[in-house]
Each structure stands twice: as C-alpha cells, then as structure tokens.
C-alpha cells in the first residue's frame, strides 16, 4: 500500500508521559483511559497497545463494535453505552457493559448477569440510573466491578462539581461494587476528593488541556499534509471557492492535500496556519473538501511533494477555530495515515 499524502504524526512518548502525569495527579486511584471514538481520532488500537505497555489496565469504549475491534488485545474494556438486546449475542469476553438504565439492568440479569459496571446519574441527565434506584435495591445481587458517575462541568469551578461528588460519595458501601470512579481528565484536576478508586481520563491523554493542573500535558497529534503543487497568484486574483480571498500582492501559494472531509473544517479558512522548517504559512481562502491553499512567500524552497505540519496545538487551536479540543481530535478523518513515533 502506498503512503497517503496525509498523515497524523503521533508522539508515543507524549501519550505515555501524559498518562503517567494523570496517574500521578490521581494519587492512589488507578488510572484508566477513555479510548472511545477510535481513541479520540488517534486510532484506538495504537493508543491501547501503548498505554497497556505503560501500565494502564482499564479502558473505556462507547459501543460493542468498538470493543470487538479491540477484543484480541489482552485488556479490560468497559462499554459506556451499556447493553442493547442486539448486543447480547456477540460479546467479547474481555468487555463488560456499563449498565446505565433500569431496562439495561433487567436485560443483563435476564441474560445471566456476570461482571458489569454501573453508571449512576448525579446531574448529567444523560446516561445512568438514579441514586433512588440504588436505594430501592435495583442492583442487589449484581456482580459490579466499578460504580461510576460522570461530572457535568469538571472543566469549570462551579458548585455543581461538589454536589455531584457528595451525591456519588454517599453511594459508597451501598452496592457490591469493588471500585468507584468519577473523574474524567478535568475531574482529576479537581483534587483528591474526586479521585475515588479509578479515574477515566480521555482528552488530556491526547494533549487536551482544560485546567491549570494540566500544564504539563504534552501535545500528541500533529496533522501533516503533502503539497500537491505550487503556483504564483498575481495581485488582484482570488483563491478558492467563492473568491473570499484576494491576493493583495503577487503571492506564492502551495496547495495541500487536506480539506474539510479530513476534519480540517471550513472554520480554518483564512485562519489556519502551517509550519515548514521555521516558516509560518497561513491558510488563504476557503478550505475545500480535499484541498487547502497556503501562502508560502516565507518558504521559497517549498514545492510539490514536500510536507507541512498544521498548527494544531489543542487549546490555542480550539480558541482560534471555535471548535472544542474534542472536536479537533475526533473529527480527524480516515484518510490520514496514523504514524506513531
Ligand atoms: C468520554 C468520557 C470520559 C473521558 O472524558 P474526558 O473529558 O475526555 O477526559 C470519562 N467518562 C465518561 C463516562 C466518558 O463518556
């Protein structure tokens, strides 16, 4: 297979250093890893292999299809969306559901039960049974590995964090659960009252920074694209769809094999930046489906076949584009070769 003209450069040392930092911030709690949505766009298999080798034991996916894709790796998977009737037939032995509704608990019991996790809702109103369900005995007799809840606004300093923590802590000893787990990446930064027995970071593993405690988190992902051609655009001519950019002077332009179908969305039109050597190369005109134009006046030697690195520093790129750090990663498309180094 020939290499794609588009690649994600993935820094394995940064990924494992981020996990190690989050594990340390989490104190005595074990540190897991959320690898749903194909490892936040990086490629779940590559992420799981590297984190498992670093000591991570608990991995979280959204669906059974995601679990099946990782079933040959010798790691424990929790399926956050629980279990539908159609999931019961083909379950990898390494995965267990995170039961998240009264119906799912009933379904799991009728199917013979077995080890499971349970999500309790403490304010998200998304997935999860209620604390009242627990008090009413819904979980009695279930073999629960981890009891979980999920924070609404862990990336903000708001009173709801403390209320959710207290509601969750009140469930200690009320179920058969061996462990309790509340904190995602931002929740780990809220301090030891939030750590319980197991943490579930996602975005910070992949370079996302949301709180001061994440200052040591390193960038993992760099999108790189090949130049398909270089051309001269004379003053007054326009570049790209709808002629939104007019060359203010004669300009050197490089056309990249990268576009919104790859997750490099139109919000980067006239806003994105690429780098080659030391040169800073701004995006000019609209991002197309498969192509993006750069001004390369600053890089006289750059030409067809050369590679440029897109500026993708997560917090800064999120602020510039209006996309969240999560969207920046999970939108990265299937046409990228994912290259670990
Ligand atoms: C996605 C997810 C996480 C990870 O969240 P981050 O903000 O990416 O750290 C943890 N727990 C649950 C239930 C999730 O859905």
Image (cartoon, rainbow, N blue to C red):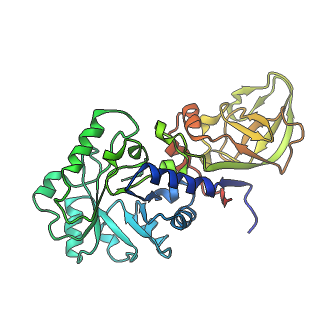
Residue 108: x, y in percent?
24, 71
Could you say which is closer to the camera, residue 11 or residue 264? 11
Q: Quadrant of residue 267?
A: top right
| Residue 202 visible to the viewer | no
Could you say which is closer to the camera, residue 172 or residue 7? 172
Which corner quadrant holds the C terminus? bottom right
Residue 199: x, y in percent?
38, 54
Could you say which is closer to the camera, residue 323 or residue 148? 148
The structure residue drawn at horizontal position 23% and vertical position 58%, both measured from the top left corner, is 101
| Residue 164 visible to the viewer | yes
The structure residue drawn at horizontal position 71% and vertical position 34%, both measured from the top left corner, is 283
The structure residue drawn at horizontal position 47% and vertical position 63%, both measured from the top left corner, is 56
Residue 86: x, y in percent?
33, 71
Q: Residue furthest right?
A: 301
The structure residue drawn at horizontal position 57% and vertical position 41%, both measured from the top left corner, is 314
Which corner quadrant holds the N terminus? bottom right
Residue 8: x, y in percent?
66, 54
Left or right: 274 in relation to 95: right
- Determine whether 166 is above or below 61 in the image: above
Left or right: 125 in relation to 36: left
Left or right: 235 in relation to 124: right
Query: What is the count of numbered marks?
Result: 0
Q: Residue furthest left?
A: 136
Q: Quadrant of residue 7?
A: bottom right
- Determine whether 8 is above or below 176 in the image: above
Q: Quadrant of residue 230?
A: top right
- Determine whether 261 is above or below 81 in the image: above
């Amino acid at each position: 297979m020939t290499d794609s003209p588009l690649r994600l450069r993935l820094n394995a040392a940064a990924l494992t250093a981020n996990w190690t930092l989050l594990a340390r911030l989490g104190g005595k709690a074990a540190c897991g890893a959320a690898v749903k949505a194909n490892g936040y766009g990086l490629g779940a298999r590559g992420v799981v292999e590297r984190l498992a080798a670093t000591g991570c034991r608990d991995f979280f996916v959204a669906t059974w299809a995601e679990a099946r894709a990782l079933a040959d790796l010798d790691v424990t998977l929790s399926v956050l969306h629980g279990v539908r009737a159609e999931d019961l037939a083909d379950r990898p032995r390494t995965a267990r559901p995170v039961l998240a509704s009264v119906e799912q608990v009933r379904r799991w019991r009728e199917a013979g039960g077995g080890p499971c996790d349970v999500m309790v809702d403490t304010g998200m109103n998304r997935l999860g049974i209620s604390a009242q369900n627990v008090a009413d005995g819904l979980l009695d007799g279930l073999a629960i590995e981890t009891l979980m809840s999920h924070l609404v606004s862990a990336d903000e300093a708001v009173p709801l964090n403390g209320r959710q923590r207290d509601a969750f802590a009140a469930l200690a000893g009320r179920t058969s659960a061996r462990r309790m787990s509340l904190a995602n990446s931002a929740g780990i930064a809220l301090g030891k009252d939030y750590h319980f027995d197991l943490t579930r970071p996602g975005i910070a593993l992949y370079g996302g920074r949301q709180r001061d405690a994440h200052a040591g988190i390193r960038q993992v992902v760099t999108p790189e694209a090949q130049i398909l051609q270089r051309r001269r655009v004379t003053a007054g001519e326009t570049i790209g769809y709808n002629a939104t950019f007019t060359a203010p002077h004669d300009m050197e332009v490089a056309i990249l094999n990268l576009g919104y179908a790859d997750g490099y969305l139109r919000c980067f039109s006239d806003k994105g930046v690429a780098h080659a050597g030391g040169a800073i190369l701004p995006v000019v005109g609209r991002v197309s489906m498969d192509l993006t134009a750069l001004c390369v006046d600053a890089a006289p030697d750059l030409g067809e076949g050369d590679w440029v690195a897109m500026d993708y520093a997560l917090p800064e790129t999120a602020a510039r584009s209006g996309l969240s750090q999560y969207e920046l990663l999970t939108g990265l498309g299937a046409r990228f070769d994912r290259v670990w180094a």
